[in-house]
């Protein structure tokens, strides 16, 4: 199973005039989402499940990919690394979902999950806006072995 953590692209500042969950992507954020979506589409194969936080900015980011996606409240703002893992169907002892799961979400949960997958402990790692961290997991001797396949920011593309 592959797991892609995709932080929403650049969004409007939270100025108090609009509720946080309704903040939209900026023009720069729309470009970031398109660039990353183009890069991902060239590399995705097989079954892909796209799970998206219910906020406007994450839905806009995922929409750029052009694939069907599922709104998943469990990965919205306030989620934690364990919520994301459970939603993806990945744990220390199994990867139950086949194919690729893409989680389009928020900090700090995405960074905490990246730290957990790579170091075995949650830590406050930063995933930049619009970036992806692509992991691959497979079962080996009854444990999930995790490999970091790619870290890509749209400015690199």
Image: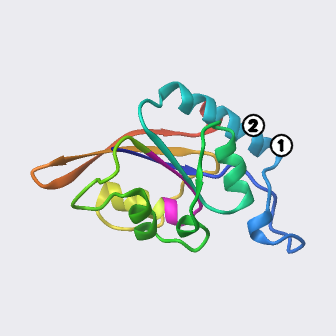
Q: CA distance from mark 1 to mark 2?
A: 6 Å
User: Number of numbered discs present?
Assistant: 2
Query: Which x, y percent locates residue 106?
Result: 59, 61
Q: Secondary structure at mark 2?
A: helix
Q: Residue at x 68, y 43 (%)?
A: 63
Query: Which x, y percent locates residue 99?
Result: 37, 40
65 and 20: which one is in front?
65
Q: Residues within 10 Å of mark 1 (few under 14, many from 20)?
A: few
Q: Quadrant of the N terminus?
A: top left
Q: Residues within 10 Å of mark 2 (few under 14, many from 20)?
A: some
Give the extent of the magenta segment: 101-110
Query: Which x, y percent locates residue 10?
Result: 73, 51
User: In the visual, does 5 lie left or right of 131?
Assistant: left
User: Marks 2 and 1: in contact by CB < 8 Å?
Assistant: yes
Q: Which residue is mark 2?
A: 31
In the image, farthest residue toward the left: 141
Kindly tell me whether residue 123 is visible in this rendering: no
Residue 88 figure quarter: bottom left
Q: Which residue is mark 1?
A: 27
Q: Quadrant of the C terminus?
A: top right
Q: Residue at x 55, y 49 (%)?
A: 6
């Amino acid at each position: 199973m592959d797991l892609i953590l995709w932080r929403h692209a650049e969004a409007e500042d939270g100025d108090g005039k609009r509720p946080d969950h309704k903040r939209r992507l900026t023009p720069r954020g729309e470009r970031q989402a398109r660039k990353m979506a183009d890069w991902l589409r060239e590399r995705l194969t097989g079954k892909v499940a796209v799970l998206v936080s219910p906020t406007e900015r994450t839905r806009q980011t995922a929409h750029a990919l052009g694939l069907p996606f599922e709104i998943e409240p469990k990965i919205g703002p306030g989620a934690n690394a364990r919520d994301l893992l459970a939603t993806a169907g990945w744990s220390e002892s199994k990867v139950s979902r086949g194919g690729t799961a893409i989680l389009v979400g928020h900090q700090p949960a995405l960074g905490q999950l990246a730290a957990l997958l790579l170091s075995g402990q949650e830590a406050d790692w930063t995933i930049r806006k619009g970036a992806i961290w692509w992991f691959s997991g497979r079962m080996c001797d009854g444990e999930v072995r995790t490999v970091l396949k790619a870290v890509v920011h749209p400015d690199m593309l």
